[in-house]
Amino acid sequence: MVFKILMNLLVSSILVLRNFLLLIFSPYKTMRKIAQEKDYWQLAVIISFVLIYFEIANKIRRFNYSTLLIFIVFLSFFISTVFFFYLLGKVYNKKEELKSFFITFSYSLLPTLVWFITNSIIYYVLPPPRTMSLQGKGFSILFFAFSLSLFVWKIILVYLSVRFSAKLSFYKIIFLMILYLCLFFPISIFLYQLKVFRVPFI
Amino acid sequence: MKAINTRLKQSLNRAFFVEPNDLGFWFLTSLFKKTTKPLKTMPFIIVIPTAFFIAFVVYLILGKWFIRLVSWLQYGF
Protein backbone atom coordinates (compact mmCIF):
# COMPACT_ATOMS: atom_id res chain seq x y z
CA MET A 1 0.00 0.00 0.00
CA VAL A 2 2.72 2.48 1.09
CA PHE A 3 4.91 1.31 -1.80
CA LYS A 4 2.03 1.94 -4.25
CA ILE A 5 1.49 5.47 -2.88
CA LEU A 6 5.23 6.22 -3.12
CA MET A 7 5.36 4.91 -6.68
CA ASN A 8 2.31 7.03 -7.64
CA LEU A 9 3.97 10.10 -6.11
CA LEU A 10 7.25 9.43 -7.89
CA VAL A 11 5.61 8.90 -11.29
CA SER A 12 3.40 11.98 -10.84
CA SER A 13 6.41 14.09 -9.77
CA ILE A 14 8.20 13.11 -13.00
CA LEU A 15 5.05 13.95 -15.01
CA VAL A 16 4.74 17.33 -13.24
CA LEU A 17 8.37 18.20 -14.03
CA ARG A 18 7.91 17.12 -17.67
CA ASN A 19 4.68 19.13 -18.03
CA PHE A 20 6.34 22.06 -16.31
CA LEU A 21 9.10 22.13 -18.97
CA LEU A 22 6.57 21.65 -21.76
CA LEU A 23 4.48 24.55 -20.43
CA ILE A 24 7.52 26.79 -21.00
CA PHE A 25 8.00 25.70 -24.62
CA SER A 26 4.46 24.98 -25.82
CA PRO A 27 1.87 26.15 -23.27
CA TYR A 28 -1.13 25.72 -25.60
CA LYS A 29 -0.63 22.05 -26.53
CA THR A 30 0.53 21.10 -23.03
CA MET A 31 -2.40 22.75 -21.26
CA ARG A 32 -4.82 21.09 -23.69
CA LYS A 33 -3.28 17.72 -22.78
CA ILE A 34 -3.29 18.51 -19.04
CA ALA A 35 -7.02 19.40 -19.20
CA GLN A 36 -7.71 15.79 -20.24
CA GLU A 37 -5.59 14.30 -17.39
CA LYS A 38 -7.22 12.13 -14.76
CA ASP A 39 -4.25 11.86 -12.39
CA TYR A 40 -5.04 13.60 -9.07
CA TRP A 41 -1.55 12.76 -7.77
CA GLN A 42 -0.14 15.55 -9.95
CA LEU A 43 -2.38 18.01 -8.11
CA ALA A 44 -1.10 16.61 -4.80
CA VAL A 45 2.53 17.01 -5.95
CA ILE A 46 2.05 20.69 -6.96
CA ILE A 47 0.21 21.51 -3.71
CA SER A 48 3.05 19.81 -1.79
CA PHE A 49 5.57 22.03 -3.63
CA VAL A 50 3.62 25.07 -2.37
CA LEU A 51 3.68 23.75 1.23
CA ILE A 52 7.44 23.07 0.97
CA TYR A 53 7.94 26.59 -0.41
CA PHE A 54 6.03 28.16 2.54
CA GLU A 55 8.14 26.11 4.98
CA ILE A 56 11.46 27.19 3.38
CA ALA A 57 10.38 30.86 2.97
CA ASN A 58 9.41 30.93 6.64
CA LYS A 59 12.98 29.92 7.54
CA ILE A 60 14.53 32.64 5.31
CA ARG A 61 12.14 35.35 6.46
CA ARG A 62 9.89 34.81 9.49
CA PHE A 63 6.18 35.03 8.63
CA ASN A 64 3.77 36.80 10.99
CA TYR A 65 1.60 33.68 11.04
CA SER A 66 2.36 29.96 11.13
CA THR A 67 3.17 28.22 7.85
CA LEU A 68 0.14 25.98 8.26
CA LEU A 69 -2.26 28.94 8.61
CA ILE A 70 -0.82 30.65 5.50
CA PHE A 71 -1.07 27.34 3.64
CA ILE A 72 -4.73 26.92 4.70
CA VAL A 73 -5.48 30.49 3.51
CA PHE A 74 -3.73 29.75 0.20
CA LEU A 75 -5.66 26.48 -0.18
CA SER A 76 -9.01 28.18 0.54
CA PHE A 77 -8.12 30.88 -2.00
CA PHE A 78 -7.18 28.25 -4.60
CA ILE A 79 -10.35 26.18 -4.05
CA SER A 80 -12.53 29.32 -4.17
CA THR A 81 -10.86 30.34 -7.46
CA VAL A 82 -11.51 26.91 -8.99
CA PHE A 83 -15.16 26.88 -7.85
CA PHE A 84 -15.66 30.46 -9.07
CA PHE A 85 -14.66 29.57 -12.64
CA TYR A 86 -16.34 26.15 -12.48
CA LEU A 87 -19.73 27.45 -11.31
CA LEU A 88 -19.79 30.49 -13.58
CA GLY A 89 -18.47 28.44 -16.51
CA LYS A 90 -21.31 25.99 -15.94
CA VAL A 91 -23.80 28.75 -16.79
CA TYR A 92 -22.44 28.68 -20.38
CA ASN A 93 -21.31 25.07 -20.68
CA LYS A 94 -23.02 22.25 -18.77
CA LYS A 95 -20.55 19.53 -19.88
CA GLU A 96 -17.45 20.81 -18.02
CA GLU A 97 -15.68 18.68 -15.38
CA LEU A 98 -14.50 19.88 -11.98
CA LYS A 99 -11.35 17.71 -11.97
CA SER A 100 -10.12 19.39 -15.16
CA PHE A 101 -10.35 22.80 -13.40
CA PHE A 102 -8.40 21.53 -10.38
CA ILE A 103 -5.57 20.05 -12.46
CA THR A 104 -5.20 22.95 -14.94
CA PHE A 105 -5.40 25.63 -12.22
CA SER A 106 -2.79 23.78 -10.15
CA TYR A 107 -0.44 23.94 -13.16
CA SER A 108 -1.16 27.66 -13.54
CA LEU A 109 0.36 28.06 -10.05
CA LEU A 110 3.81 27.18 -11.42
CA PRO A 111 4.83 30.70 -12.62
CA THR A 112 3.85 32.12 -9.21
CA LEU A 113 5.79 29.36 -7.47
CA VAL A 114 8.88 30.00 -9.64
CA TRP A 115 8.64 33.74 -8.89
CA PHE A 116 8.33 33.21 -5.14
CA ILE A 117 11.17 30.64 -4.99
CA THR A 118 13.50 32.84 -7.10
CA ASN A 119 12.57 35.88 -5.02
CA SER A 120 13.41 34.00 -1.80
CA ILE A 121 16.84 33.02 -3.20
CA ILE A 122 17.53 36.59 -4.45
CA TYR A 123 16.40 37.97 -1.06
CA TYR A 124 19.01 35.74 0.60
CA VAL A 125 21.80 36.54 -1.92
CA LEU A 126 21.04 40.23 -2.64
CA PRO A 127 18.83 41.53 0.19
CA PRO A 128 16.74 44.67 -0.54
CA PRO A 129 16.44 47.70 -0.54
CA ARG A 130 17.95 48.46 -3.95
CA THR A 131 19.99 51.63 -4.46
CA MET A 132 20.27 54.23 -7.23
CA SER A 133 23.78 52.97 -8.16
CA LEU A 134 24.42 51.57 -11.65
CA GLN A 135 24.30 47.99 -10.30
CA GLY A 136 21.09 48.77 -8.37
CA LYS A 137 19.40 50.20 -11.46
CA GLY A 138 20.61 47.31 -13.64
CA PHE A 139 19.40 44.72 -11.18
CA SER A 140 16.06 46.53 -10.82
CA ILE A 141 15.46 46.46 -14.59
CA LEU A 142 16.46 42.78 -14.71
CA PHE A 143 14.22 41.84 -11.76
CA PHE A 144 11.26 43.83 -13.11
CA ALA A 145 11.61 42.23 -16.57
CA PHE A 146 11.84 38.78 -14.96
CA SER A 147 8.73 39.43 -12.82
CA LEU A 148 6.82 40.81 -15.82
CA SER A 149 7.72 37.80 -17.99
CA LEU A 150 6.47 35.39 -15.33
CA PHE A 151 3.32 37.48 -14.87
CA VAL A 152 2.56 37.29 -18.61
CA TRP A 153 3.21 33.52 -18.51
CA LYS A 154 0.82 33.29 -15.54
CA ILE A 155 -1.92 35.18 -17.48
CA ILE A 156 -1.42 32.86 -20.49
CA LEU A 157 -1.70 29.76 -18.29
CA VAL A 158 -4.79 31.01 -16.41
CA TYR A 159 -6.46 31.90 -19.73
CA LEU A 160 -5.66 28.45 -21.13
CA SER A 161 -6.87 26.77 -17.91
CA VAL A 162 -10.28 28.41 -18.28
CA ARG A 163 -10.29 27.88 -22.05
CA PHE A 164 -9.70 24.12 -21.87
CA SER A 165 -11.59 23.38 -18.66
CA ALA A 166 -14.71 25.47 -19.29
CA LYS A 167 -14.35 25.33 -23.11
CA LEU A 168 -15.50 28.94 -23.35
CA SER A 169 -14.86 31.55 -26.05
CA PHE A 170 -12.44 34.49 -25.69
CA TYR A 171 -15.04 37.13 -24.70
CA LYS A 172 -16.61 34.93 -22.02
CA ILE A 173 -13.19 34.10 -20.54
CA ILE A 174 -12.20 37.78 -20.42
CA PHE A 175 -15.55 38.62 -18.81
CA LEU A 176 -15.05 35.90 -16.15
CA MET A 177 -11.45 37.04 -15.51
CA ILE A 178 -12.53 40.67 -15.01
CA LEU A 179 -15.34 39.51 -12.69
CA TYR A 180 -12.82 37.37 -10.78
CA LEU A 181 -10.43 40.32 -10.37
CA CYS A 182 -13.29 42.58 -9.15
CA LEU A 183 -14.20 40.02 -6.48
CA PHE A 184 -10.84 38.56 -5.47
CA PHE A 185 -8.48 41.54 -5.77
CA PRO A 186 -10.05 43.33 -2.74
CA ILE A 187 -9.69 40.07 -0.77
CA SER A 188 -6.01 39.87 -1.80
CA ILE A 189 -5.47 43.48 -0.69
CA PHE A 190 -7.19 42.67 2.63
CA LEU A 191 -4.94 39.62 3.12
CA TYR A 192 -1.94 41.81 2.23
CA GLN A 193 -3.01 44.34 4.91
CA LEU A 194 -3.19 41.48 7.41
CA LYS A 195 0.35 40.50 6.24
CA VAL A 196 -0.84 37.03 5.25
CA PHE A 197 0.36 37.61 1.68
CA ARG A 198 3.17 40.12 1.17
CA VAL A 199 2.35 40.73 -2.50
CA PRO A 200 -1.37 40.88 -3.25
CA PHE A 201 -1.39 38.27 -6.00
CA ILE A 202 -0.91 34.51 -5.89
CA MET B 1 -5.25 0.88 -41.68
CA LYS B 2 -7.34 0.61 -38.51
CA ALA B 3 -4.42 1.95 -36.43
CA ILE B 4 -4.01 4.95 -38.76
CA ASN B 5 -7.75 5.66 -38.51
CA THR B 6 -7.60 5.53 -34.70
CA ARG B 7 -4.59 7.86 -34.63
CA LEU B 8 -6.26 10.26 -37.07
CA LYS B 9 -9.41 10.20 -34.95
CA GLN B 10 -7.35 10.92 -31.80
CA SER B 11 -5.54 13.83 -33.51
CA LEU B 12 -8.83 15.30 -34.72
CA ASN B 13 -10.36 14.93 -31.25
CA ARG B 14 -7.35 16.75 -29.76
CA ALA B 15 -7.48 19.53 -32.36
CA PHE B 16 -11.24 20.06 -31.95
CA PHE B 17 -11.22 19.64 -28.17
CA VAL B 18 -12.49 23.23 -28.05
CA GLU B 19 -14.27 25.22 -30.72
CA PRO B 20 -12.04 27.78 -32.51
CA ASN B 21 -12.42 31.34 -31.22
CA ASP B 22 -14.68 33.61 -33.21
CA LEU B 23 -14.59 37.29 -32.18
CA GLY B 24 -17.59 38.30 -34.30
CA PHE B 25 -15.75 40.25 -37.02
CA TRP B 26 -13.38 38.51 -39.46
CA PHE B 27 -10.61 41.13 -39.02
CA LEU B 28 -10.78 40.83 -35.21
CA THR B 29 -10.64 37.02 -35.42
CA SER B 30 -7.74 37.24 -37.88
CA LEU B 31 -5.88 39.77 -35.67
CA PHE B 32 -6.50 37.58 -32.59
CA LYS B 33 -5.13 34.50 -34.38
CA LYS B 34 -2.04 36.39 -35.62
CA THR B 35 -1.37 37.83 -32.13
CA THR B 36 -1.87 34.61 -30.19
CA LYS B 37 -0.01 32.30 -32.60
CA PRO B 38 3.49 33.18 -31.28
CA LEU B 39 2.22 32.82 -27.70
CA LYS B 40 1.12 29.22 -28.26
CA THR B 41 4.66 27.92 -28.77
CA MET B 42 7.86 29.39 -27.29
CA PRO B 43 6.13 32.53 -25.89
CA PHE B 44 9.29 33.63 -24.07
CA ILE B 45 11.00 34.50 -27.39
CA ILE B 46 8.59 37.44 -27.57
CA VAL B 47 7.78 37.92 -23.89
CA ILE B 48 11.35 38.36 -22.55
CA PRO B 49 12.56 41.12 -24.96
CA THR B 50 9.19 42.92 -24.60
CA ALA B 51 9.45 42.69 -20.79
CA PHE B 52 12.97 44.20 -20.87
CA PHE B 53 11.76 47.02 -23.12
CA ILE B 54 8.76 47.73 -20.84
CA ALA B 55 11.01 47.57 -17.73
CA PHE B 56 13.38 50.13 -19.30
CA VAL B 57 10.50 52.43 -20.28
CA VAL B 58 8.95 52.16 -16.80
CA TYR B 59 12.38 52.95 -15.29
CA LEU B 60 12.66 56.07 -17.51
CA ILE B 61 9.16 57.20 -16.49
CA LEU B 62 9.25 56.42 -12.75
CA GLY B 63 12.96 57.05 -11.95
CA LYS B 64 13.71 56.43 -8.27
CA TRP B 65 10.13 55.20 -7.70
CA PHE B 66 10.99 52.29 -9.98
CA ILE B 67 13.82 51.27 -7.60
CA ARG B 68 11.36 51.53 -4.67
CA LEU B 69 8.83 49.40 -6.55
CA VAL B 70 11.45 46.68 -7.12
CA SER B 71 12.49 46.81 -3.44
CA TRP B 72 8.81 46.40 -2.46
CA LEU B 73 8.49 43.43 -4.83
CA GLN B 74 11.64 41.89 -3.35
CA TYR B 75 10.09 42.07 0.13
CA GLY B 76 7.01 40.39 -1.28
CA PHE B 77 7.55 36.69 -0.64
Image: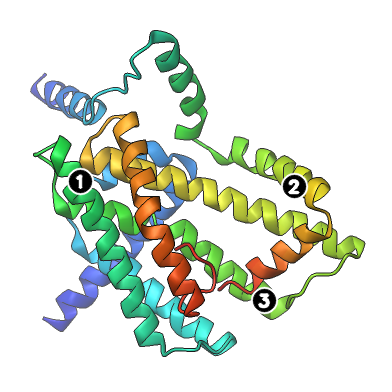
- Report how far apart the C-alphas of labels 1 and 2 lie in the structure: 36 Å
Question: Judging from the image, what secondary structure is the residue with disc 3 in?
Answer: helix
| Residue type (three-letter) at the residue carrying disc 1 | Leu
Question: Judging from the image, what secondary structure is the residue with disc 1 in?
Answer: helix
Mark 1 or 3: in front is 1
The part of the image, by quadrant, that contains residue B47 is top right
Question: Residue under circle 1?
Answer: A88
- Report how far apart the C-alphas of labels 2 and 3 lie in the structure: 22 Å
Mark 3, other Cα within 10 Å: few <14 / some 14–19 / many ≥20: some
The picture places residue A171, in percent across and down from the top left corner, at 33, 30
| Residue type (three-letter) at the residue carrying disc 2 | Val
The part of the image, by quadrant, that contains residue A187 is bottom left
For image coordinates 20% across by 46% down, the residue present is A88
Question: Residue under circle 3?
Answer: A123
**What chain does badge 1 belong to?**
A
Viewer-nearest residue: A114 or A187: A187
**Mark nearer the N terminus (1 vs 3):** 1
Question: Residue under circle 2?
Answer: B58
State the scheme by which the image is colored: rainbow
- Can you say whether B14 is above or below A30 in the image? above
**What chain does badge 2 belong to?**
B
Viewer-nearest residue: A125 or B56: B56
